[in-house]
Amino acid sequence: MATDVTYGAPSGAAADRPPEAAPPAWKNGRNLGLGRLYLRRFLRNRLAVAGVVIFVLLVLFSAFGGLFTPYTHSDADFAALTQPPSAAHWFGTNQGGNDVYASAVHGLQRSLVIAVSVSVLTIVVAAVIGSGAAYFGGRVERATLAVIHFLLVVPSFLILALVSHRLAGDWRVLIVVLTVFGWMSTARVIWSVSTSLRERDYVTAAEFMGVGALRIILRHLIPNLGSLLIVNLTLGVVATVLSETALSFLGFGVQTPDVSLGTMLADGASTVTSAPWLFAFPAGLVVLLTVSMTFIGDGLRDALDPTSVTGAAGGRR
Amino acid sequence: MTRATTRPRTSLPTGTPAPVLSVRDLRISFPSESGPVEAVRGVSFDLLPGRTLGVVGESGSGKSATAMGIMGLLPPSAGLRGQVLLGGRDLAGLGDKALSDVRGKSIGMVFQDPLSALTPIFSVGRLLADTLRIHQDLTKRAAWEQAVELLDLVGIPDPRNRAGSFPHEFSGGMRQRVVIALAIANKPSVLVADEPTTALDVTVQAQILDVLRLAQKETGAGLVLITHDLGVVAGHADDIAVMYAGRFVERAGVDELFRRPVMPYTARLLAAVPTVDSGVHRPLAPIGGEPPALVDLPAGCPFASRCAVALDACRAAEPELRGITGHGDVACLRADEIADGSLDPAGTVTGDAQEPHSGRAATGDVVLRVEDLVKTFPVTKGAVLKRRVGTLHAVNRVSFELRAGETLGLVGESGSGKTTTLLEILRLKQPEGGRIEIAGTDVGAVGSAARIRELRRDVQIVMQDPLDALDPRLPVFQLLAEPLQAIGRDRESIRSRIRELLALVGLDEAVSDRFPAALSGGQRQRVGIARALATEPRLLVLDEPLSALDVSVQAGVINLLARLKRELALAYLVVAHDLAVVRYISDRIAVMYLGHIVETGDTETLFSDPKHPYTRALLSAIPVPDPQRERARERVVLEGEQPSATRVPAGCVFVDRCPLHRLADEEVRRRCRTERPAPVDVAGQPGHQYACHAV
């Protein structure tokens, strides 16, 4: 996924480097600031900026969209069952008379909250476990990898479906379940990158200074995985949205009367031909959400990767 | 300076031959966040067949970019202007496809790192045969035959069988020979060697430079030799061009340049290099300041801000390279005054150049005592079930002691066990064999973790590459706070200690909120030293502390280390491969070979009267930055390379490469083979010991 990102500056072992490898943040003795540098490189990527704009609009929509309609997602308008979009019901209504617009706002909100919190939790768990395994090495490493590899071959989606169904579809439980079965592949990537970071001189130096293991992991390993973590975070949102909608679509995720984009898709799927608006609006939102996050993720990877051509060459490609 | 220019080694053919390579006003720029970096700003030269142009400069001076520009190997984002005329054809405008015809055929390139320059999945014979067949119409068989001949030419033993071996089966020096064979395969008219010996050990460096000279003689090619090592060019170049900030600032014949460097930068550079051969220590004079960033260069001479003899006019306009009578070309307004001796380019600055050598004044307490230290590594085979197939004897019964205020230098080629010895000491655990005693405490006998933490404070390390040793995500303040937090200091005392430390290593307090990437190489190494000093250690372990630094910066750090040792009564244990540097900073030296100490002694006695044949070879392999002495002096060139430590000979470890062994009589030869020599004292030289049967 994002294993091709380069971490940290290239090693300075070569006695002489062509100047383009010199720290780019350096100008006339003044430090440009790492944050501003990354921002500049990010903004150069038009797709990434478009992604940010779309994502911000989606967040605003999920937060404040409800203000523009008198209905909530649970209100049923029995005078308007399965109505196409109109002035009263902007996105139409479904078979039960629920306003699709209100449902979409709520569903998006639900899906976003789940997606963001799951991917944050996943990254935190994966970073600690992955870099911890790499740092300690030996038996700890082998045991952790065994668990990771075992969980990776287990058909996690099935287990997820069964477990989340048992737990009555509370969306908070869904967050926990998705995290528990979603951290392994990221942890595996983080582990493999950390094994090379672990050999870096600054980690050895910290050991010789008598710095504790936990502190080395939290202070030296994880921050230096920064770009990998950020990229994985954004792409993790995409993956979570998709698996949450998939679960809900199959009836295992969020349960009625609660609404997520997945349940809306499931409702709309059966009537795609007779009442297309029931399917089109939530599907459009899912597409916008995943596409925007993918653009942001790609943009971040290019901006944070010092060897990226797109960033360095002033967007020539 | 009116003496006619003599060319001692390469006699020019009659008439002036046409240059094989002419570079005209080469300009190279790279895009960056803060605007284009002008790496090369107008370089012009002619290279005659059979002659060697040495291009010397520090990192970032544009010398590698020049080489890449000539070869057409710049990244596509780089901008290139000017002309690169090879046999009347301009390479600068050519596309990659057309250039591929030229590269390898008319221009051969020798890269710095021989491992990454060879494709690992092909045998070296195949690599050579392919190179030949791309440019010549040869059958597979004929190409293979030629490949074997080439390998023989560059000195690969048993070339017919070795041609089937893969790059990883060769040692570093042998790989570099293969790279040279590749470069000369199609008899190019121009060879470009970019730091060809930087990645190699000093004894191997001498061999490779000889091979390079042989290859040049064989093909009659002109050679562009790019290096940061003034010693290498002194012995091997005919002409030297000194690069600074993307331009040639001085270009002259090798003798003139070293006799009287005219550009102040060259003069200061030569004054900043420690040399091995000088009996008397001259203080090293570092060049203050840093080379300018090559973005938006201000008008005027780029060296003016660091120059001791700069005039106001120097800052107004950049001087052009112009001919100076009897001296080649110099880009300096005051070149005439300097050339006729009426102006000293070093000016009156003395900087913090002090006498760095305190002689053998060390009579302090013993800070470190190592007795019979042994460290082995298992050699395993197989991916799943690891079988132990052998033992690597990294360190074998090494003993030494170190007193407060003293510097012990550990020297030897890579693989001799120097770094392993350091790491064993720093681990602060019971060694595999022998004893390590720090400040009177036996490390193996200490049980409690608290006591080990005490000991940690006493031993600290300064690492080779400060860029790698400092976490790039932490600002200087946090970096320096780390060891103090580890020993449980409170916030206020950490703050005041960091202020002290920065002052101690000569850094401004303003750097404390900078990130390592925003510091220069010298500043970074000062931060590394400050961090090591934070806990007030008594023993400082320095692992190649200067090898990642540029010459002009190196001198400043050497002086700093000497001052700190004097002021804080520290003991230094230094590992370095650069013997000139070691001589400068060490009071005593221990020479290691294959995990054994073969000779120890005071620095001066060891350098002036080396006993062990390995020490002699090591000392004679170092190139001296003085062309006349370099050519005149006698050299012991060792054959081969240090063998792997998995099969240590039963007798003397050096026996396979020993020049004395070959000449010795039967009885001594038998002893060398079967009996490991014990250290012997040298009469009249206290502390000088060597381990050899044949001396």
Image (spheres, rainbow, N blue to C red):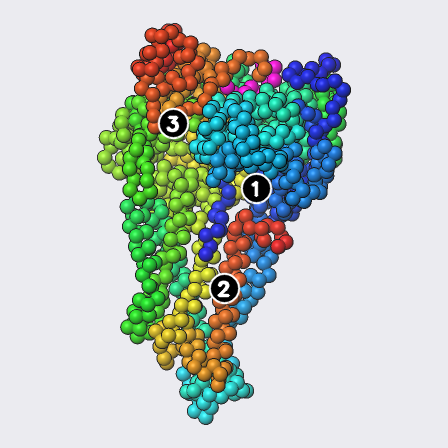
Q: Are marks 1 and 2 in contact (CB under 8 Å)?
A: no
Magenta includes B623?
yes
Which residue, given by chain and number where applicable, does mark 3 sit on? B644
User: Looking at the image, can residue B609 be seen?
Assistant: yes
In the picture, measured across the screen, residue B24 lies left or right of residue B462, that is right
Q: CA distance from mark 3 to mark 1?
A: 36 Å
| Chain letter for the residue marked with disc 2 in the picture | A
| Chain letter for the residue marked with disc 1 in the picture | A
Disc 1 crowd, CA 10 A, few/some/many (<14, 14-19, 20+):
some
Give residue B395's position: percent from left, percent from top. 34, 26
Residue at 60% across / 38% down in the picture?
Answer: B134
Magenta includes B600?
no
Give residue B62's position: percent from left, percent from top. 63, 36
Q: Element under label 2? A: helix
Which residue is more in the foreground, A136 or B102? B102
> Does B265 sit above or below residue A18?
above
Can you tell which of label 3 and label 1 is closer to the viewer?
A: 3
- What amino acid type is highlighted by mark number 3? Ser
- What amino acid type is highlighted by mark number 1? Ala
Which residue, given by chain and number where applicable, does mark 1 sit on? A22
| Chain letter for the residue marked with disc 3 in the picture | B
Magenta stretch in the rendered image: B621-629
Residue at 46% across / 24% down in the picture?
Answer: B158
Residue at 36% across / 8% down in the picture?
Answer: B666
Q: CA distance from mark 3 to mark 2?
A: 53 Å
Which residue, given by chain and number where applicable, does mark 2 sit on? A293
Which residue is more in the foreground, B268 or A258? A258
